[in-house]
Image: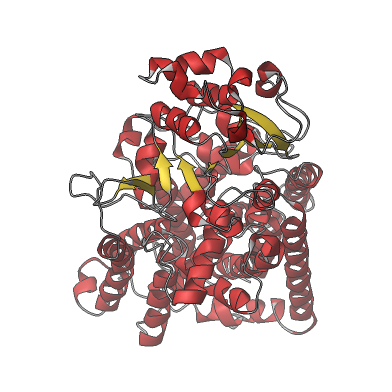
Amino acid sequence: MEESDPLFRRAAVGERRRSVSLAPLVTGAGSARARVRVSGRELAWWRIALGAVLALGFALRAGAAWRISPQIDEPFSVLAGQMVAGRGVPILPSGTLYLHGATLSYLLAPFVWLGFGDLADLRLLRLVSVVAGTVAIYFAYRVGRLVSGHVLVGIIAAGLLAIDPRSVQWSGHVRMYALLQALTLAFVWVAFRMLFSPPSRQRSAVVVLVAWAAAFTHMLSAVMVAPLGLLALVLFRRRLLGERRDLVITLGLCALAPLVVLALTRLVAPPRSSDENSGLLSFAGLELFNWNRLTNLSWDTWSYLFAGGLLARQLPGAVVALSVALAVYLLFGVRAGMRPVANRGPLVALLVCYWVPVGLILVLTGDSFSRYLLHIHPLSLVVIAVVLVKVAALWEGRVALRRLPVLISPLIAAGCLVLLGIHFGMGLARQWEFPLVDADYYPSLRYVAQRQQPGEPVIVALPAAAYLVLPNLEDIRFLAGQEGNPRAARYTSRTTDGRIVDYWIGAESIVSRAGLCEMFRRHPDAWVVVDLWRLREPWAYQGDIATIIWGMTTQLDVSTTGVFVLRAAPPELRSPGAVELCASLDLAPSQAGVGRSAAAYWWWPTGPRSVSWAAQSDWSQAGTVASGRSSSRGK
């Protein structure tokens, strides 16, 4: 089904560019040929195909939600959902307004009201993301059909998104990325209809509503406004001040949404020390923007979206090549003697709305996480679907390649589609075989909760998870890192009374090596819950912090995902290296635990025993969290 679109087409007779309704593309009306293609029996088959794709996508996402291990940030979303259910707004126990995923928090609140709001209910809570990911598949179909005029393009785009491993994974987590993906695709769909259709207040209202919902889901949704503004400027120019001023008003209201999120985050905040250096973009995802990336641009974050299968190395380059080829075909095909391209304007808009946000995110984000591009990723699949259908249509004589046998171009397109299916299938198979995404703190924290006595401090790497499991907030200590660590500065703040607390639950925080040594000196009954991955990562605890932890504790339990439950060891079992390190930090040897009475270690089950620190630090069994999981790294 194809419809002609004069937008972006410079007619030789100098015809004035004008707005053209895309209603034929949406409703299936239009030319006689288009009506035949989407009517009757064929329309029923397309609906069956779309239903099958949606069912497949839902099944894969539900399977991921059931099987894959927790992502390290999921407790933060669960905590925010609990706060919405209890307070009506996502204000965390620390007093911080947590708008990072606020839309998701409100969707989780009904589960909390029904009694399913704990980490033990994580699989049930993940259904919100499963449904959101399935909705994203539907809107991928709508966008593909809208920009191309082909139902087949929409079906292929939806099918590719249904089996995309990265989208499947993040649709299985209680995080905002599946919802953001659905809202972004919905925004692109309604925004394109607004851009290429006559003014409509109802359509503009829907665009603004979706944009605000996306902004309160994740700040990175704001990058979609820039390419739309650029397209509006190129398309209508001076008419933006006249007959198309609706675009200026609508896009202006869309751009206002992230500013409101920023303002609310700054205004609704707990009292902090006046000398604390906290910028406007300082927390809960708002610190993402980093101008230093301009001098250190890397495409690895983007290319990782295509990793995990047969074409892991080739597919990123292929997407770039296909985008360039499609752009050249759209912009210069008529001059080269090719037949005018149907839906030229929406296809150019598709390329702009994909590559401009990709460039902005790669330049402006300080954290190299591929999930920050996940909401834009489906547009690359739409580009692939458009090119495949164009290739398959070569035999119809739409371009000057009529001498090719009629089956060659469809076979080429079908072969490429099969290769893509194999590539994505390999990624899904690997995901099913290795469902470990991150360290699962829940079993280890449950172990501590069943044994910890009131007043015994629990040093944790993730305060939100500890808050959801441990009974007493006063016993939680957040191990932010050592002095000079950006992680410590990013996730802690100093209160007006001088205490250093974390941003989420307001727990006392350890931000130095001396502070950690002092904790073990004052509390011989202290617990430590930490995963091996963070102990080995330079941005977390690698170095002196890890040395102190390994040397001043003994192991009580370790989970299959690499989470250790440790406890302060008796003086005679402490590592000499750790004791010397603490002593060098202006702590006398006696302050490191020497001279404590045996009664201080009443919790020791069978009396002091020797521990092999090297064996602990080299622990690397099959259940260890694999290094290099940049796609899921979190707090």
| Residue 45 placement, left or right of 514 | right
Asked if residue 40 lies left or right of residue 472, the reply is right
Image-based side of 41 in relation to 345, left or right: right
Residue drawn at (59%, 17%) of the image? 575
Confirm whether residue 480 shows in the render: yes
Asked if 309 appears above or below 399 in the picture, the reply is above
Task: Identify which residue, 396 or 267, lies in the foreground.
Answer: 267
Q: Nearer the viewer, residue 467 or 399?
A: 467
For the point 47% across and 29% down, which residue is it? 521
**Rendering quarter of residue 155:** bottom right
How many numbered tags mark residues here? 0
Please say whether residue 378 is visible from this viewpoint: no
**The N terminus: image quadrant:** bottom right
Between 218 and 607, the one lying in front of the other is 607
Residue 123, relative to residue 573: is it above or below? below
Using the image as rendered, state which of residue 457 and residue 304 is in the foreground: 457
- For the point 57% across and 71% down, the residue is 108
**Residue 536 % position (x, y):** 57, 26
Rendered location of residue 472, percent (x, y) = 53, 57
Q: Position of residue 327 (x, y in %)?
A: 47, 49
Relative vertical location of residue 273 with respect to residue 191 in this rendering, above or below: above
Q: Residue at x 18, y 44 (%)?
A: 275
